[in-house]
Image (spheres, rainbow, N blue to C red):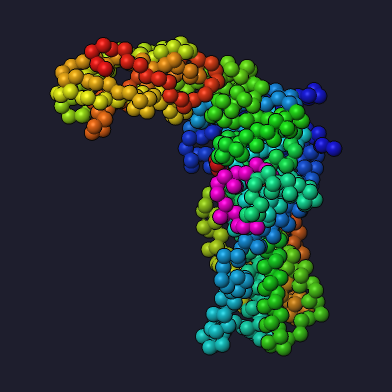
Amino acid sequence: MSADIIVRVEGASKKFCRDLKRSLWYGLKDTAADLIGGHSSNGLRPDEFWALDGVSFELARGECLGLIGRNGAGKTTLLKMLNGLVKPDKGRIELAGRVGALISLGAGFNPILTGRENIYVNGSVLGLTKKEIDSKLDEIIEFAEIDDFIDTAVQSYSTGMQVRLGFAVATALQPDVLLLDEVLAVGDAAFRAKCYERLARIRDSAAFILVSHDTDQIARVCSKVLVLDRGRERYLGDVEEGIRIYHELSRPRQQTSSFEQSAAGTIASIGSCDDTVADGGLFTFSISVDVPELVAVADVRVVFWGDDGLPALDAYTRTQGWSLRVKAGSSTIRLAVGPLRLKRGRYAVSIAVLNRSNNLHLYWGDRIRTVEVDGPMTGAVGYTPPLTCLSSDVG
Amino acid sequence: MRDHRLTVYTPESPLRQPTKFVRDMIADLLASRELAWRLFLRDLSAQYRNSVFGYVWVFLPPLVASLPFVYLNSTGVVRMGDTPIPYAAYAMVGTIIWQTFVDALNSPLRTINAARAMLTRINFPREAILLSGLLQVGFTFLVRLVLLIAVFGAFALEPAATAPLFFVGMLSVVATGFMIGLIVTPVGILYSDVSHGLPIASTFLMLLTPVLYPVPASGFGAIVSALNPLTPLVTTTRDWLTTGHAAHLGGFILVSAVTVTFLVFGWVAYRLALPHLIARLGN
């Protein structure tokens, strides 16, 4: 292994079995094969599939690899193989130096023991000597922000406190290779910021592998990206390109429903609707309504849902201080939302038209359309651009 | 100074590099001592922290196991045969030896099952779990020793001159139980049948082994006792404490030698099996 490459993975593969009974039996057979020094079969046995298939990459000191992929893509399996918890079925993995892993926080914590006792246990599980822990104890307690609780049983800690304690102990190890499996998602924003700061500090001396569904986090921390798709290596390299490919893979999740609803006596449906919007452009749509009597004060609310299922945009006429007037009979409401400043991606759009006097829906379409926004790779989410009325027959 | 040792993972059986395998075994065993001690302390201090009766639970099993037989023997319903010391003391010594054997037998599977979450998520010297289990067995035995001393005091008995050898006997009893437990562990981690079967098997075995009665001199019981490899273990250990005359010393040495051999085999199998078992256990 050359001087600065500290992780080398060549064609690493792992097979899993769908059937539990068979899986257990194969486990015994593989053990027996190892025991007689033989070789377990290279091919797939009944009910087996490749959970990870021929993954290769190299990582040098100072680099951070972002591991992304949908659920079941093999990310955790790869991390477990890198950590030596499971053996590859094919391929080869080489690591130089001390390996630290946060595959799950709080593993090895005993709920009945105090934080201080658990620091010693967890520290020695991760390979620290008592002397090393003694010298780092204050630093760990300070970083985890649990001074008042250090002599309290861990079972009365909040999840966030346990995460903080786990992270503080694991990074005190000063590893050469650090494996992080989506552990930072649990802490609050202030603690996450502190974690990034600490990661940045030990970054020069180590190589990281970070699993996360949060592409902003990946873009901020990682120097390259490995996209896994059902166990296969889909892309390895540039972070922006990798994230774009990952979003493409995640697309089928962003499906529209055809759920449209109106209050009794009202007939409404969605008319035209933009399906692509340029960065800084307007999203326009129209709703045809047929109301039995005049609705003097009607509100429109538009929500864009991101890939993560969270609202990326929420525009509401009521909070923007204006409303529509919908005359009796049929009319078409045309509105525009924008300028849009969203990060690139595909969004599901929900639209509601409400009668302010009784809060009933004139129209409600939940995730009724999807729209492709061509924005920057990263960016803010959750803002409220102005709504503008475009039609002449309402207002 | 950081250590820059290279770690390599391949699908090959580690036994194909026997020198490295043995070196890793010894290195991990040495590296696991401190962790084993910590895990032992952790379990010890956690074990009875949420219990009212605490260490009473350590004394109860041998008491409960022997008292019915002491009662039956005293009523004359069941005659246990002639014992060199009062029957109650004899039964108590036997059950303490046996209970320690059972503790050691259950130890590997019990400690590994308790550490599942750790095993599937953290890489650490796997011997630490086994060692911490052994420390627990040893500690429980020491607590029960207090019970034994109390019984000897109550009956005004003098331990035999060979009494220090009793601890050598106990070492072999623990090693044998632990060896059997370790060998069934790879299967036991995957299939719960083993943990269901072990308590039943050990209760049955106790009645087949001269724990609560002396070795039968004749009849079917004599044949079973002669064939049972646990007979020399239990009787020799007890004889060293009580009479000083070990009638089955040859068998004791033979069983101990076999135990050591299989203990090494069980350890090798354990190391080889764990990555495969963890892969099957999932999260």
Identity of the residue drawn at 60% across and 23% down: A219
Let me know if residue A59 appears in the view.
yes
Magenta region, residue range: A151-169
Up/down of B22 relative to A333, above or below: below
Examine the image and state in which quarter residue A228 appears. Answer: top right
Left or right of A66 on screen, residue B21: right
Prevailing secondary structure of the magenta residues: helix
Identity of the residue drawn at 73% across and 68% down: B170
- Quadrant (top left, top right, bottom left, bottom right) of the N terminus of chain B: top right
Front position in the image: A175 or B214: A175
Up/down of A72 relative to B156, above or below: above
Identity of the residue drawn at 62% across and 34% down: A193
Front position in the image: B121 or A285: A285
Identity of the residue drawn at 30% across and 14% down: A334
Up/down of A278 relative to A246, above or below: above
Could you tell me residue A86's position as x and y percent?
A: 63, 37
Q: Residue furthest front?
A: A321
* Residue A157 among magenta residues: yes
Q: Residue furthest right?
A: B1
Left or right of B282 on screen, residue B40: right
- Quadrant (top left, top right, bottom left, bottom right) of the C terminus of chain B: top right
* Residue B51 among magenta residues: no
Front position in the image: B175 or A359: A359
Front position in the image: B264 or A155: A155
Could you tell me residue B48's position as x and y percent?
A: 60, 66
